[in-house]
């Protein structure tokens, strides 16, 4: 198992533990999910802007190919921030209205979960960035991949409202979220490594 995958399991285990210790329910668990998704978005933007050589094959904006230059990279990153940020702003409104975090203990637990995930995601980013520099990743793929992380949020809201938020559901949602994290981490690394391998093969010719 990759180190990044182990770190993701640890980060989600910490999230589950703090939720159980502080008496949270499924609704409260959506808060650390939201924080984690914002962190993922921040690193996704950083990764796009850090690209030196990249491809935009098959990637269009307003029915026009996205240029493989600094302008294309920055406009893509800005669009991602706008769209991804608007989506999470909507989630924030929902959480504030339906699952407000009360008390310093709850806030402390949420902060601990966020810090653990930052440490995990930092290592994931470092590995991805190193592979990106060796290859020629597709900018469009990098922009769309983080959206897979919000699917467990949708499942949490829909299933939580239908089934209730008992302790058993906490384990179910945490398992779903952890599986999504590990799966996306593997996809990210595979994309970066394949790009690096293709670039290396071209350079050897």
Image (cartoon, rainbow, N blue to C red):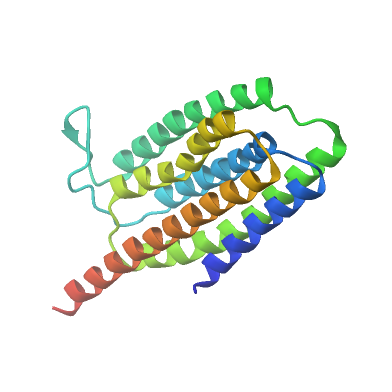
In the rendered view, does 13 fall on the left or right side of 156?
A: right
In the image, residue 69 lies at what x, y percent? 27, 45
In the rendered view, does 153 fall on the left or right side of 77?
A: right
Query: Looking at the image, which residue is at 34% across and 43% down?
Result: 73
Of 81 and 133, the residue lying toward us: 81
Residue 54, above or below 160: below
In the image, residue 190 lies at what x, y percent? 34, 65
Which residue is most to the bottom? 204
Viewport quadrant of the C terminus: bottom left
Count of numbered tags: 0
Residue 67, above or below 118: above
In the rendered view, does 93 fall on the left or right side of 158?
A: right
Query: Looking at the image, which residue is at 61% across and 22% down?
Result: 93
Among the 4 quarters of the image, the one containing residue 99: top right
In the image, residue 86 lies at what x, y percent? 49, 26
In the image, residue 70 lies at what x, y percent? 33, 44
Among the 4 quarters of the image, the one containing residue 103: top right
Query: Looking at the image, which residue is at 27% across and 52% down?
Result: 138
Query: Looking at the image, which residue is at 18% across and 79% down?
Result: 204
In the rendered view, does 102 fall on the left or right side of 147?
A: right
Of 1 and 83, the residue lying toward us: 1
Which residue is most to the left? 205
Among the 4 quarters of the image, the one containing residue 140: top left
């Amino acid at each position: 198992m990759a180190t990044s995958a182990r770190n993701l399991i640890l980060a989600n285990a910490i999230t589950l533990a703090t939720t159980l210790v502080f008496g949270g329910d499924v609704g409260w668990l959506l808060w650390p999910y939201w924080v984690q998704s914002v962190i993922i978005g921040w690193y996704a933007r950083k990764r796009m802007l850090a690209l030196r050589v990249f491809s935009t094959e098959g990637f269009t904006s307003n029915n026009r190919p996205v240029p493989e230059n600094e302008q294309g990279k920055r406009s893509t990153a800005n669009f991602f921030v706008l769209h991804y940020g608007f989506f999470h702003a909507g989630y924030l409104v929902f959480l504030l209205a339906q699952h407000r975090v009360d008390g310093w203990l709850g806030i402390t637990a949420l902060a601990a979960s966020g810090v653990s995930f930052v440490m995990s995601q930092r290592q994931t980013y470092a590995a991805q960035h190193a592979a990106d520099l060796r290859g020629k990743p597709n900018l469009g793929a990098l922009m769309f991949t983080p959206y897979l992380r919000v699917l467990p949020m949708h499942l949490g809201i829909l299933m939580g409202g239908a089934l209730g938020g008992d302790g058993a559901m906490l384990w179910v949602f945490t398992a779903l979220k952890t599986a999504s994290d590990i799966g996306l981490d593997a996809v990210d690394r595979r994309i970066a490594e394949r790009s690096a391998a293709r670039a290396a093969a071209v350079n050897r010719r």
